[in-house]
Image (tube, rainbow, N blue to C red):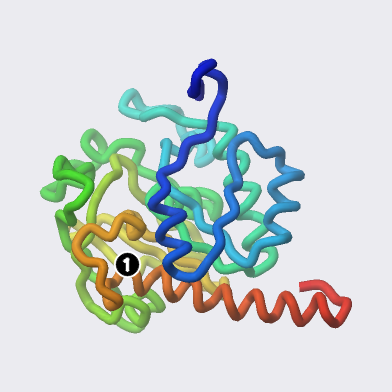
Amino acid sequence: DAGGTYQRPAVLMYESYINALEAAGLAPVLITPAHSPEAVRSLMAACAGLVLSGGEDVDPARYGEAPSPALGSVNRRRDQVEFTALEYALQQQMPVLGICRGVQVINVALGGTLYQDLATECPGPVLHQQREDWGHRTHRASVVEGSRLHEIVRSDELLINSYHHQAIRDVAPGLKVVARAEDGMVEAVEGQDHRWLIGVQWHPERYEASTSDNDPDRLLFRAFSDVLYGAATRHQAAVDAGGAF
């Protein structure tokens, strides 16, 4: 929306996403609501993976529902750009990491639905829109043993933050739930037919509890980085051979 000295349309993003990715050895390229679908595909062709970040609510029209009175702000230009980017990534079997809104975008894009507002549609004992400051983790999530996420974080249980009033309701075909909160709410999903597709409902880029190397959130970004380096190597080999990735 409007920003800057002249109050014109602007793009805003927390730098914690960039910091977390750079700490994992990656160089982030921003794709914004200001980009056209053609520009999005061109940028994606130069990248090895996709991160879908947190933000506004997904337009419920995308999963066939009228807006709830408790729906937050939506950004249809952002929806269009991110659905375009995700479609490209899935077609190319690019690694994908979805964060908060990002996991919701993944679920909706693949045919799932969302709770538009947990407080009115699915009240429970866990406060998913935490009142604590940025630097706190507030509830636990159980991780499914044998899942890719479990292999990455090396734990059956995580202590996570919670900054969302929407969440996955009907899980999309092709996704499997790999973590749930204490009240049963979906906290993470993985793609069943995709090389590397993980979406988490919390914000791993904020590093609330610890900055140690074995922090589960750092392990998640490191795993994403590791798979990207493999993808980049294959991409360069294909380029060197005159072929397509």
Q: Position of residue 46 (x, y in %)?
A: 71, 61
Q: Nearest the camera: 81 or 15?
A: 15
Give the residue drawn at x 50%, y 24%. Answer: 1
With 193 as the anchor, is 135 left or right in this view? left
Measured along the vertical axis of the image, is residue 237 above or below residue 193? Answer: below
Tell me if residue 112 can be seen. no
Residue plotted at (29% across, 40% down): 165
The percent position of residue 233, horizontal first and vertical second, equals: 67, 80
x%, y% of residue 237? 76, 82
Look at 63% across and 34% down and name the residue there.
Answer: 34
**Residue 17 in view in this figure:** yes
Q: Residue at x 36, y 29 (%)?
A: 71
- Which one is nearer the viewer's eye here, 245 or 144? 245
Q: Residue furthest top?
A: 6
* Between 168 and 7, the one nearer to me in the picture: 7
Where is residue 16? Give x, y as percent: 38, 52
Q: Where on the picture, by quarter, is residue 45?
A: bottom right
What residue type is disc 1 on?
Answer: Asp
Asked which quadrant contains residue 141, the reply is bottom left
Q: Which residue is mark 1?
A: 217
- Left or right, 240 with respect to 34, comes to right
Would residue 62 be found to the left or right of residue 147 on screen? right
Badge 1 element: helix
